Image: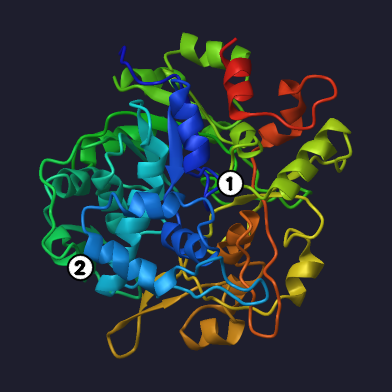
Amino acid sequence: MKTNHPVIIQGGMGIAVSDWKLAKTVSQAGQLGVVSGTAINSVLVRRLQDGDKEGHVRRALRAFPSQEIAEQILASYFIEGGKETTKGYKRPPLFSVQSPKPLLQLNVVASFVEVFLAKEGHHNPVGLNLLEKVLLPNLSSLYGGLLAGVDYVIMGAGIPREIPGALDLLSQSKPASLKVHVEGSAPGDETLTTFDPAAVMNGVLPQNLKRPFFFPIVSSSILAANLKKKATGEINGFIVEGPLAGGHNAPPRGPMKIDEHGEPIYGPRDVVDLKEMAELGLPFWMAGYYATPEKLAEVQAQGAHGIQVGTLFAFSQESGLMPDIRDKVVSLIVKNDVPPKGLVFTDPLSSPTGFPFKAVRLSNTISQPDLYEKRKRICDLGYLRHAYKKEDGTIGQRCPAEPVEDYVKKGGKLEDTVGRKCLCNALMADIGMPQIQSGGDIELPMLTAGDDLNFLGRILNPGQLSYSALDVLHYLLK
């Protein structure tokens, strides 16, 4: 099915690696730039506490429909000139099934700001990426994106069956709900998290918001067919992501088996049938180790509309990664100074979600087990916590990466804590916003990338140690 969708989709990489600057660059070049909405409220408040030196956040805030809400956020978090470098960041509250109104307002505004800045100054489409596994902020994130005119919503790390219907309702500024999986609930015991725009926006309700295209990320044609049939609203296309993509990967189909290097084993059942995808009649993009002109042409010949590319964009000059971390990785690859097994390791344990997570083997990051073992466990951002039913019938939240004794006291299994890492804090450190914990400990980064990282040098000319997002597009579309 022919459409006018872009051929290249820039992957939505959290936390704020695919920030508004990267997305804007890609979109202005005629492809689909995508901002990450993961933990976007924490990103916003830290930008404000760093002083918003270039004024971009405050400019976007002036465009928000409710200036009363925008001014409350500025009063709570903005620090003229930036906070003292030795002090930690003030944290926003943690999300819950019924999050407090100021937190929902903050998240709406944060998502609005990111999409607004990515769309500012041009008329090309921009996308918003969210994670099904980070469910509680999603409705407010979606509404903030809608207020800014987001054109595409892309969601992975789970099965986002209810998101299309939520988009239909939110585009009309009507309340929307999502089912929350609560461990220990009785059969038929349903828990909902609800977002009501009228209540959150203090009555300021823009009408007839554009309903964006929705692309779920799937790992098989079976899942795609199921979503097309059973989703609560219209699905407009699919991102088909294989196990070589960065970030979270879908677990192998069948029992988890580990190879001699400690990585999950994927087999023939995990290979997506492109013919079956094409027969669904919706456009689809292949993701995970497809970022070459040859592979783009190959999958297009088999019915794909194009490819989604993350890793190559993540290490471009426009990405949100800390420049020194980004440049160090590029330099290692150019000099071929990489471990024998390559830079990327698929860690079956590190993510609190239980999904395999790609980690870059890099010094002074928590991918080094000895460094992480020295870290005092803390869960102060809480995006990857799981809901569970307490003995008194109320709902609590726990994270396998929190202090072990706390997790076990909440009814969690001790074995679930082994190897788990605080991705929330590590990914904030990746973008230059590490928390300074009590006692002065500074959170360390943990990079993620797809297997394409090992071949990043193919887009560099001799002598180059950096490249732009436009260089990526020129390479792929030559």
Rendered-image quadrant of the N terminus: top left
Q: Is residue 202 left or right of residue 227?
A: left
Residue 188 image label? 2
Q: Looking at the image, can residue 273 be seen?
A: no
Residue 107 higher or lower than 97, as above or below: above
Residue name at image x 33 percent, y 28 percent: 237
Q: Nearer the viewer, residue 218 or 123?
A: 123
Q: Position of residue 6 (x, y in %)?
A: 40, 21
Residue name at image x 59 percent, y 66 percent: 425
Q: Position of residue 80 (x, y in %)?
A: 50, 67
Q: Nearer the viewer, residue 427 or 45?
A: 45
Q: Is residue 281 left or right of residue 200?
A: right
Rendered-image quadrant of the C terminus: top right
Residue 165 image label? none
Residue 320 image label? 1
Marks 2/1 in contact by CB < 8 Å: the verdict is no
Instruction: Name the amino acid type tagged 2.
Output: Gly
Residue 120 higher or lower than 306, as above or below: below
Q: How many marks do you count on the picture? A: 2
Q: Nearer the viewer, residue 196 or 385?
A: 196
Please tell me how crowded label 1 is: few (under 14), some (14-19), or many (20+) other residues with Cα within 10 Å: many
Q: Nearer the viewer, residue 157 or 320?
A: 320
Marked residue nearer the N-terminal end (2 or 1):
2
Q: Secondary structure at mark 1?
A: loop
Please tell me how crowded label 2 is: few (under 14), some (14-19), or many (20+) other residues with Cα within 10 Å: few
Quadrant of res 364: bottom right
Residue name at image x 30 percent, y 46 percent: 145
Quadrant of res 126: top left
Q: Looking at the image, can residue 477 be seen?
A: yes
Of badges 2 and 1, the one in the foreground is 1
Residue 22 higher or lower than 57, as above or below: above
